[in-house]
Image (cartoon, rainbow, N blue to C red):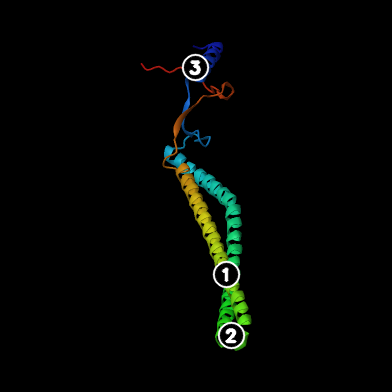
Amino acid sequence: MLSARDHKRWAAALEDHVYRNASLELPSCPALKLTATAGMSEGEFRSRLALALREKRDAAVEALRRKYGTKLSALEDRERRALQKVEKEKAQASDKTLSTALSVGGSLLGALFGGGRRGSAISKASSAARRVSGASKERADVAHAEADVEAIRNQLEALNAELEAEVARLESEFDPATIAVETASVKPRKADIAVEDMALVWVP
């Protein structure tokens, strides 16, 4: 018991025992590659996880909005151009309709009261009839332009719905209440083990 050599031998045996058998049990989250520090409770560790998850979620949502932002901007630009085309087609159709109405009215009056110039009046009436056909085409162009606007708006709604669904998925994926927390066993390194004092104690 008084041999210093034996004390060193026992200290080495104790170090070996600790190295082979002892471990520190700590809360751990493999998904985030995070492990609690010594002395941290699971509640404290979950608070740390919540902060890390919130930061990851915000970054993921921001990246997602940037990704969809390009597509949404392109569609919104197409919608603006389509609306401008509708207004242009409506203006052209309105002008054509008014011009046609005046032409038809004038031709009919000429045919009824034109006296000896009935042939010329009939020719004008035929021209007016062609204008009516042209006005119908302008109205069809308006309808096509409006259909284009509606189609683009449907695409915008679908893309926005897809974006919101992706955001909701991220919210669920980064929910602190559902993230898995496990227990990690941390084994000591041999170089970190040191027996600073050895003593023999007995109880009479």
Q: Residues within 10 Å of mark 1 (few under 14, many from 20)?
A: few
Q: Which mark is residue 133?
A: 1
Q: Residues within 10 Å of mark 2 (few under 14, many from 20)?
A: some
Q: Which mark is residue 110?
A: 2
Where is residue 107, by image quadrant?
Answer: bottom right
Instruction: Tell me the kind of residue under disc 1.
Output: Ser
Q: Measuring 60% from the left and 59% from the top, which residue is drawn there? A: 78
Quadrant containing the C terminus is: top left
Q: Earlier in the sequence, mark 1 or mark 2?
A: 2
Q: Position of residue 67 (x, y in %)?
A: 59, 49
Residue contact between numbered discs 2 and 3, judged by CB atoms under 8 Å: no
Relative side of 44 to 113, left or right? left
96 in relation to 4, above or below: below
- The local secondary structure at tag 1 comes to helix
Instruction: Tell me the kind of residue under disc 3.
Output: His
Q: Residues within 10 Å of mark 3 (few under 14, many from 20)?
A: few
Q: Position of residue 70 (x, y in %)?
A: 61, 53
Query: Circle 3 is placed at which residue position?
Result: 17
Q: CA distance from mark 2 to mark 3?
A: 120 Å
Where is residue 46, by image quadrant?
Answer: top left
Q: Position of residue 19 (x, y in %)?
A: 52, 19
Residue contact between numbered discs 3 and 1, judged by CB atoms under 8 Å: no
Q: Earlier in the sequence, mark 2 or mark 3?
A: 3
56 in relation to 90, above or below: above
Count of numbered labels shown in the rendering: 3
